[in-house]
Each structure stands twice: as structure tokens, then as C-alpha cells.
Image: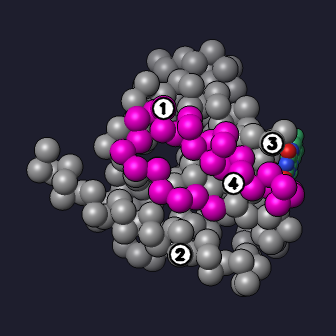
């Protein structure tokens, strides 16, 4: 069984990105993976902004990433890139925090014009953190995610391609585990 951290970089209290993360986490759990949620907005703001890795909540976030076989990194598109909140969290991780891990980038946005934010803005940062394999990511339009009470629904027409990407990520994580065990 692989351990996967699903990280949401949205500052929104009611967040489509976090809803997407919940949907993806459910799918990964149903496939037998152990999944931990990490919401950047829940971390203590002062410690996050000061990159205070001695703070127990920040240290716990860093440990979650360290112990994971795979990491899902999700962000809303903000100003044609990813959120500043996500960057604050990524910046306090060790330089090669994603070494030995498979990483899945996911982005939600209001306009398909910014679909490339995932590959032009987010992917280079994930690569610079030493990820072994950044698998193809996915962009979900905000209007295709509905949150009704605690229930998350994805537009069915657009859920299938997302599921393919998530399943490919999960397979890549599983495929790496024997390699890491042998190293
Ligand atoms: C400050 C801000 C900037 C945004 N910039 C963009 C943008 O450049 N391109 C885009 O497609 N959507 C943009 N959006 C829309 C959000 O990316 C989109 O609604 C997203 O799903 C919000 O995720 P959340 O509910 O997790 O906050 C922006 C929203 C905000 C609040």
C-alpha cells in the first residue's frame, strides 16, 4: 500500500480546489492507498510566512510530505499562475523534498485560457523540488465542480479524464515502490 499526501494550496474557506482534492482522495482510498490531506490554509499563518519549520504544525506538514510515496499538489489558478499560499508552503520544504516521489499537479481555474499554468508555472517548481516523476496533470474548470453542503460533484463529462490522470498517477506510485525498497 502506498502513502499519498494530497496538498491543497487554496486560501478559500469554501474551496473548489479542496473539493477536487477530496474527490481525488476518495478515489485513491478506494484504490487501496493511504491518503493524508494537507490544506495550506489550515497551517498557522505566522509560522508559514516566517518559514518556521520548528513550529510543530509546520514540522508535521513537512514530515507528511517526507513520508509519502506520492504527492498530489493542487492549486487554484491565481493571476495566471498558482497561489502564493501554495508557494509559501513549497518554499519551506527541504530543497529536494520530492526526491524519490511521484507528483501529480492539479489546478482549478475560471478560464480555459489559463490551462497552461499547470505546465508553465507549477510543473517547473515541482521538478525543482527533485520529484522523480511529475506525471501529466489536469486542469478543472471551477464551474465543473459543485459543492452542496459537504457533497462534492464533478461534471460527469469532465470527471472521466480526471479519473484517468489520477489512476495513472496511482499506478506510477505503485510502480516506484519496489524500486525504492531495493535502493
Ligand atoms: C485572486 C484570484 C485570481 C484568479 N486568477 C485567475 C486566473 O488568472 N485565471 C483563471 O483561470 N482563474 C483565476 N481565478 C479563478 C480561480 O482560479 C478559480 O475560481 C478556482 O477554482 C478557485 O479555487 P478555490 O475555490 O479553491 O479558491 C482567480 C481567482 C482569484 C480569487
Magenta stretch in the rendered image:
109-138
Q: Which residue is labeled 2 in the image?
A: 164
> Can you name the residue that lies furthest to the bottom here?
156
Q: Which residue is labeled 1 in the image?
A: 128
- Image quadrant where one finds the C terminus: top left
- Element class at badge 2: helix
Q: Distance between the Cα atoms at labels 4 and 1? A: 18 Å
- Element class at badge 1: helix
Query: Is any part of residue 31 visible from this angle?
Result: yes
Task: Tell me which residue sits at (67%, 20%) in the image.
Answer: 49
- Element class at badge 3: loop
Is the shortest distance between ligand 1 and the CB of mark 3 under 8 Å? yes
For disc 1, the neighbor class at 10 Å (few under 14, some 14 to 19, many from 20) is: few
Q: Earlier in the sequence, mark 3 or mark 2?
A: 3
Q: Which residue is labeled 4 in the image?
A: 107
Question: Do tag 3 and tag 1 residues touch (Cβ < 8 Å)?
Answer: no
Q: Distance between the Cα atoms at labels 3 and 1? A: 20 Å
- Element class at badge 4: strand
**In the image, is 10 to the left or to the right of 106?**
right
The front one of 107 and 22 is 107
Task: Tell me which residue sits at (86%, 68%) in the image.
Answer: 143
Question: Do tag 2 and tag 4 residues touch (Cβ < 8 Å)?
Answer: no
Q: Nearer the viewer, mark 3 or mark 4?
A: 3
Amino acid at each position: 500500500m502506498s502513502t499519498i499526501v494530497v496538498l491543497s494550496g487554496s486560501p478559500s474557506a469554501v474551496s473548489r480546489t479542496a473539493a477536487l482534492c477530496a474527490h481525488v482522495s476518495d478515489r485513491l482510498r478506494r484504490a487501496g492507498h493511504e491518503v493524508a490531506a494537507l490544506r495550506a490554509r489550515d497551517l498557522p499563518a505566522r509560522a508559514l510566512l516566517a518559514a518556521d519549520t520548528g513550529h510543530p504544525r509546520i514540522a508535521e506538514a513537512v514530515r507528511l510530505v517526507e513520508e509519502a510515496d506520492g504527492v498530489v499538489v493542487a492549486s487554484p489558478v491565481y493571476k495566471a499562475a498558482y497561489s502564493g499560499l501554495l508557494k509559501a508552503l513549497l518554499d519551506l520544504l527541504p530543497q529536494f523534498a520530492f526526491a524519490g516521489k511521484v507528483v501529480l499537479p492539479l489546478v482549478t481555474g475560471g478560464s480555459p485560457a489559463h490551462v497552461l499554468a499547470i505546465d508553465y508555472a507549477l510543473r517547473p517548481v515541482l521538478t525543482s523540488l527533485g520529484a522523480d516523476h511529475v506525471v501529466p496533470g489536469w486542469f478543472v474548470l471551477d464551474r465543473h465542480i459543485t459543492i452542496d453542503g459537504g457533497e462534492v460533484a464533478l461534471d460527469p463529462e469532465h470527471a472521466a479524464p480526471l479519473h484517468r490522470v489520477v489512476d495513472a498517477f496511482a499506478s506510477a506510485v505503485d510502480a516506484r515502490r519496489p524500486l525504492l525498497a531495493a535502493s
